[in-house]
Image (cartoon, grey):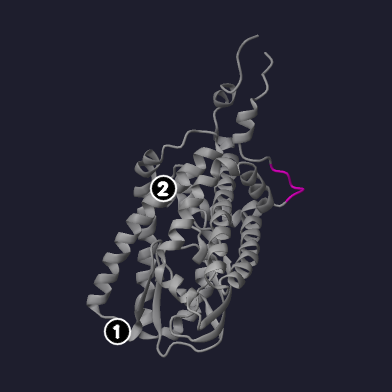
Amino acid sequence: MVPEPESSAESAASPPPRDRSSGAFSRHVSRVTDRLGDLLPYAVVPFVLSLLEVDKIERTLDPHRTSFSVQFSLPSPLLELWSLVDPPDPASTGSSTTTGWDTGAPFEGSGGAAPVGGPTTTGPEITIETPVESIVLPVDAVGSAEIAWLGIALLAYGAIGAAVAAAYLGGIDRRLRDEPAVLLACVVDYAPRLFAYYLVVFAAFLALLPIALIAPALVILAIPLVLVLGYLFYAAPFLLVVADAGVLEAFRRSYAFAMAGGAYFRFAVGHVVAAAIVSLVLSILLNGGVVGFALALLIASPVGLVLTAATVSLCQELVDADDKPHRAPSVDRDRFDSST
């Protein structure tokens, strides 16, 4: 019995081979750009999410404010313009420069972007980034009512973000596999688990909130921990879709991939470097008024799509390699004709 060669469509849909002559990041970006025609409609997601941040757009277009920032972003399910660049600080006038890390968490304090120059706020604030807008609360004004409102808002934004991410990641995953993408089915299949994932992150945020209220300076000490956790679990939301895993299983497998290093680590490094370069370009453009903002938006949307799709491709490769030793021989035999 001689197996027939795989079809070209199947070869295109399968993750790229483990060619050690090129880096993990460049391999998966190359795979995505080769399929960009199929994936480009999904760029509407980061495009629209960027436009929903009205406050950031207003600050960016304020002629009395200029800002230069560099964001070192780990993979994120919903990577858009404001994941790659920071707008001017809301309490600043004139020029400011910021650098920061984006760990990819859906809800995180923006304190990671530390001002390097220019005026700063008069009091500490808690900023939570959601897929729809940024929530800013002055620390000295946070009480039980504000915390209750914050919880309701995060639950609502989490539900919206879960539905959007389910359709977005599910559609990308299907297109990379050359399968039809039924977005409603993706939402039904993956949104509940993504919402549960967001609740886990929300719970982690709540655990840090008392520290931020009692001793805001101590939050700075948690930044290295947040970065480590961001690296260890950046694949978790993607694995909910790619591996059809439960929440705990997604965290477990992401941790295992991270500890193994290899392609997972090299991809993270490549992603951070690429995001920083793009961030610098976008930051320069955003100081160019309406035209600069439009150009930045048109660049950031497909770039966000490519980076997110490349992470999906990475997870497909990791899951396929991880599952292959446990796959029954009959599964592989089914790929070939049994004719003699």
SS class, disc 1: helix
Residue farthest right in this picture:
21
Residue depicted at x 50% and y 74%: 87
| Residue 124 screen position, x and y as percent | 40, 85
Residue depicted at x 51% and y 51%: 43
| Residue 281 screen position, x and y as percent | 63, 68
Amino acid marked by disc 1: Ala
Alpha carbon separation for disc pair 2 and 1: 35 Å
Q: Which part of the image, by quadrant, shows the N terminus?
A: top right
Q: Is residue 252 visible?
A: no
55 or 180: nearer the viewer: 55
According to the image, label 1 marks what residue?
Answer: 141
Residue farthest front in this picture:
291
Amino acid marked by disc 2: Ala
223 or 39: nearer the viewer: 39
Which label number is shown at residue 166? Answer: 2
SS class, disc 2: helix
The magenta stretch spans residue 19:
yes
Residue depicted at x 47% and y 80%: 89
Span shown in magenta: 18-22
Q: Which part of the image, by quadrant, shows the C terminus?
A: top right
The magenta stretch spans residue 89:
no
Crowding at dot 2, Cα within 10 Å, few <14 / some 14-19 / many 20+, comes out as many
| Residue 310 screen position, x and y as percent | 59, 50
Residue 263 falls left or right of residue 176:
right
Q: Is residue 55 visible?
A: yes
State which tag comes first along the sequence, 2 or 1: 1
55 lies above or below 176: below
> Mark 2 and 1 residues: CB-CB less than 8 Å, in contact?
no
Which label number is shown at residue 186? Answer: none
